[in-house]
Image (spheres, grey):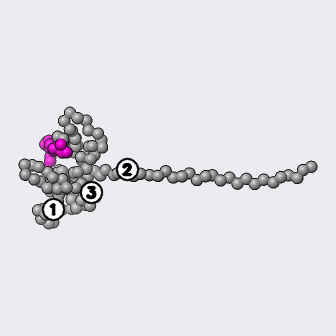
Amino acid sequence: MDENQHSIIFIGKKKRNNELQLTSKPDFSDAICLSKPLTHSTKNTPYQSIAIDGSKNLSIHFSDENIHFTYYNKSLQVLAGDKNLSDEKVLDICSNFAFKEGNKVTFLKVIPKRNTIPRKKKEVRVLLAGKELEGE
């Protein structure tokens, strides 16, 4: 792949009529595999690639919504028609894809929030010692 070649990579299958079936989200091990040159047949690989360049708009129909990926000058814009997407929704959509430029691979990972239990504060113990003075 040319170092200036950009592509969107997903894990799944390309079906007929330009339909894509996503089977899982890329993670760190996928990014490592994708950053290395291919030494095996691409027929058995789960990775599918869509080449993009700076002057091309790429439309992807995702989750019953018409999502438009606009890639221009190393910038990605995600639009959903007239609707405003929440940040969480955009992250969820983009986390299905890895973005490759030459041998560099970028992917987004949504880390789930952990339920944390607040620590109990330790009670502060104060020792008081006193002595009675013997009277006069």
| Residue lying farthest to the left in this orientation | 17
Q: Secondary structure at mark 2?
A: loop
Question: Can residue 105 be seen here?
Answer: no
Question: Can residue 136 be seen here?
Answer: yes
Question: Dots 2 and 1: beta carbons under 8 Å?
Answer: no
**Where's residue 59, x and y in %?**
14, 42
State the extent of the magenta-drawn residues as a range. Answer: 50-64
Question: Dots 3 and 2: beta carbons under 8 Å?
Answer: no
Which tag, 3 or 1, sits closer to the chain's start? 3
Mark 2–mark 1 Cα distance, whole angstroms, equals 32 Å
Residue highlighted by disc 2: 113
Which amino acid type is shown beneath numbered disc 1? Thr
Q: Which quarter of the image is occupied by the N terminus?
A: bottom left
Q: Nearer the viewer, mark 2 or mark 1?
A: 2
Residue highlighted by disc 3: 27
In the foreground, 82 or 35: 82
**Where's residue 124, x and y in %?**
63, 52
Can you say whether 116 is above or below 76 in the image? below
- Residue 70: name its quadrant: top left
Q: Is residue 109 left or right of residue 129?
A: left
